[in-house]
Amino acid sequence: MKSQALEFHKALFEELDTSRLQKKFLSALLEMQNVERGSLWIAEDDGYRCIAAVGSQSADIAGYVIPKSAQSIVGWVIDNGRMTIAEAYKDKRHFREVEAGLDVKSTLILCYPLILRDGRVYGAVEIIDTAHGGSRLNLHKDYLELMEDLVAIGAIALGNALAFADKRDENEKLRRMIADLNVDAFIGQSDAFLAAQKSLRDYAKTDFPVLITGESGTGKELAAREIHRQSDRKNGPFLVQNVSAIPDTLLESELFGYRKGAFTGADKDKTGLFEAASGGTVFLDEIGDMALSLQARILRVIQQNEIKPLGGTGSKRVDVRIISATNKDLRQAIAAGTFREDLFYRLNVLPLSLPPLRERRDDIPLLLNYFLRRDAQRMGIAPKKCTPKALRRLTDHPWKGNIREMENLVRYLLATLPCDTIDDADLPAAILSTPAPLADLSQTPVDPGRPAAAAPAHDMCEQTWEEVERGYVLALLEKCHWNITQAAAKAGVNRSTFDSRIKKLGIRKR
């Protein structure tokens, strides 16, 4: 008995994982009593929930909730705070419904309360004999008292582990809430942005794979996070892997994990990204750069919801949603033989195309103000504002690097300018030297109601940017017989942007 008690203590105090501790606690007690069935119960608001079970058909018992309104041995022990022995199906306290689906029924039940250091009873442990007549349980008084002492020690260890797990879960929820607060806003007001945002909201209602396409810097990861945040998986993990960031051999182990001894240096098991993200979302950025050998394995994850760690002998089921992104044309990659066609159709169930910044110029002032405020707050300085002249220059900039280029510019301006106002002259030479897309310096305005005639360069230098732009827009409209779609095409911008500029310039057909 002493050796068993020693093993019992070792099982309790060498285990840190809560679920494994529960199973070890139960298994040790069952071994000491030479029986094969047992269960752990904790008190909750609506009843008594089984948090762990050992023995045949234990999966049918784990998670079961006995209502507080019903009579039960567990409820009696928790309410009275003392041990009891009950003959199943003869004792009126026995809640028979728990064993309704079990092939082998209980005959004799030994139940101890789980008590914390301060004397509060938080649960109970049942040690169950299924032998005929309850012949296996040792009910000798001294043995039962020793068992009670061991349960008391185990109850404290288990209570501490449960409290720690609750705090850990609470901290994880807080961490996710804080992360959500720190996530960059997905903002805009242009037609192109609003269309993408509507698709994003619709996609968040489903669990299907999403393929996000767009130029580099258009905010593909931000869109993926927003889909996750608005989905039913929002309380689960959101894990990111840039496919092009690491070699293919390492990428496979990062995604699928490995077992100890799978290769040189694998001295312990490693959980892969798909397994770690179970219940949440995996975002695979730059999916177009993935090796063909790995593409086949990703296909299996989507089709079967299964992964197989490197060096493992069996598969594991995972519950993840896959959102992928690329700035490449995957149809061209399919034609070139570098991307699997079947994987493309699996990933492209819900396509989302993010427009470049030059196609959503109405959003540029909004985004500039947002980044200026956000980064100033992070730096602990007062936010800066753009003068109208600087704002016009930035609005007309082509932004080939899209939102990422804008973020870098804002950080540069905040770090280098001592004043609170950003003027045209404060902008980097790369911005100032870029020709504006709508300005045609061969046109100068005359009357707001008719096209402008050509004017010499020295006359144009006396005009404002708005006057030059108005003349250019009017000339285009007259040339295209006021067909806005044709005029926008000649200007090299989309129709909504061109129409918005017409309205802002106060131009109307006479």
Image (cartoon, rainbow, N blue to C red):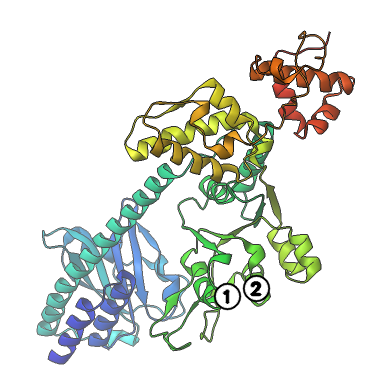
Q: Disc number at residue 476?
A: none
Dividing the picture into quadrants, the one containing residue 196 is top right
Tell me which amino acid carries mark 1.
Asp
Which sits in the foreground, 162 or 38? 162
The local crowd at label 1, few if under 14, some if 14 to 19, many if 20 or more residues have their Cα within 10 Å, is some
- State the image quarter where residue 335 is shown: bottom right
From where the camera sits, is residue 459 visible?
A: yes
Circle 2: residue type: Ala
Q: Which label is found at residue 291?
A: 2
Give the side of residue 255 with respect to residue 481, left or right: left
User: Which image quadrant is residue 346 in?
Assistant: bottom right
Q: Residue at x 62, y 51 (%)?
A: 216
Residue drawn 33% across and 71% down? 19
Mark 1 and mark 2 in contact? Answer it, CB < 8 Å: yes
- Which x, y percent locates residue 479? 88, 22
Label placed on residue 248: 1
| Pointer 1 or 2: first along the chain | 1
